[in-house]
Image (cartoon, rainbow, N blue to C red):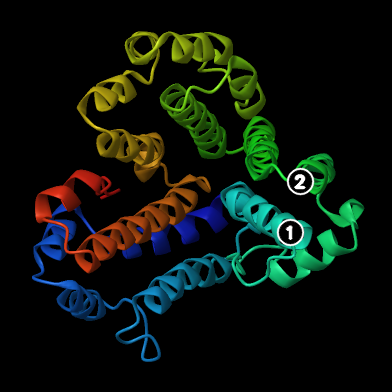
Amino acid sequence: MAEQYTYAVARIRALEVALFSNSTIDQLIACQNYKQCLQFLEEKGWGDSETSGDAEAMLTREEEKIWELVRELSVDMENFDVLSYSKLFHNLKAAIKEVCTEDGGRHIYYEDVSIPGEAMKEIVKEKDFASLPENMREAAQEAYDSLLHTGDGQLCDCIIDRAALDAIYQAGKSAKAEIIRDYAESTVAVADIKIAVRSQKTAKSAEFMRRAMAECDSIDVERLSRAALAGTDALREYLMGTTYAGGAEALAESPSAFERWCDNRIIETISPQKYNAFTIGPVIAYVIARQNEIKTVRIILSGKQNDLPEESIRERVREMYV
């Protein structure tokens, strides 16, 4: 197994040099307009001959390239399940809303997951929740019944999003790879902090936060909820006493700075894997880094398309892995 990882990591090391650095991102931001950004990306090898001039197709192709590479490395794909949970549970949420509201055509599905859009819609339509993975079944039934009887889309979101966090955390707890454990802990904790921040701004109740937040070791969700109810200062004070003090500082800066910190925290979590050559860690870290890279490029392209000033775009961009 160590030899297999050594080969895989060697491939990843060779590919890491092509990852965008912070200076490359600066160059992209400095492009004069949206069209020039696309040209810059194509010159860097993004997309393929069929995606020229189409940003969404280009970004989708880059996501496909990630998983094509991983399959070439012949490593156990189960190691990457935790990275797909957010998309998989999103498909469940979209399918329930489409079926229960009979509002077709408005919902976006991810196809690069174990249950793509059409398959998920069929499961929900037939109420065949037993065919879903075990960690989705109960939430699927509850969300479906809730939306059907109350029409409360936000409650549907809350039920499924909480189930997704629980699934990520459980995957982390049962994982042998340290990076999956660390990724799951940071992902759930950061999500809980986001819920607290948004709940504080929208005056949500303690009961709402308890339902939405997932338990994790590095955050006390009860204390976090109480802090959110007490106001922004109390929320920041609580965070300053945790390993997520950077979130408190970002909150004081701006909403954009806070959203950026949330993603940067995940990159900070995986960065030590650069120096570990004998486990699956560097491969998983590369996948997360590429996904972060694509997300950052999407933010920049959106900013350019909406004629935002460079300073405003820079405030939103994420830290790069390299």
Taking 137 as reference, is 89 left or right?
left
Of the two numbered discs 1 and 2 on the same chain, state the one appearing first in sequence: 1
The image position of residue 52, as x and y in percent, is: 32, 87
Taking 252 as reference, is 78 left or right?
right
Q: Does any portion of residue 1 appear in the rendered image?
A: no
User: Who's the residue at 62% across and 72% down the image?
Assistant: 105
The image position of residue 254, as x and y in percent, is: 23, 32
User: Who's the residue at 77% across and 41% down the image?
Assistant: 150
Q: Quadrant location of residue 222? A: top right
Q: Quadrant location of residue 295? A: bottom left
- In the image, farthest residue toward the front: 150
Q: Quadrant location of residue 228? A: top left
Q: Which residue is mark 1?
A: 101
Taking 164 as reference, is 14 left or right?
left
Is residue 237 placed above or below 94 in the rendered structure?
Answer: above
Is residue 12 placed above or below 228 in the rendered structure?
Answer: below
Q: Which residue is mark 2?
A: 147
Q: Nearer the viewer, residue 210 or 145?
A: 145
Q: Nearer the viewer, residue 249 or 291?
A: 249
Callout 2: helix, strand or loop?
helix
The image position of residue 78, as x and y in percent, is: 67, 53
The image position of residue 46, as x and y in percent, is: 32, 76
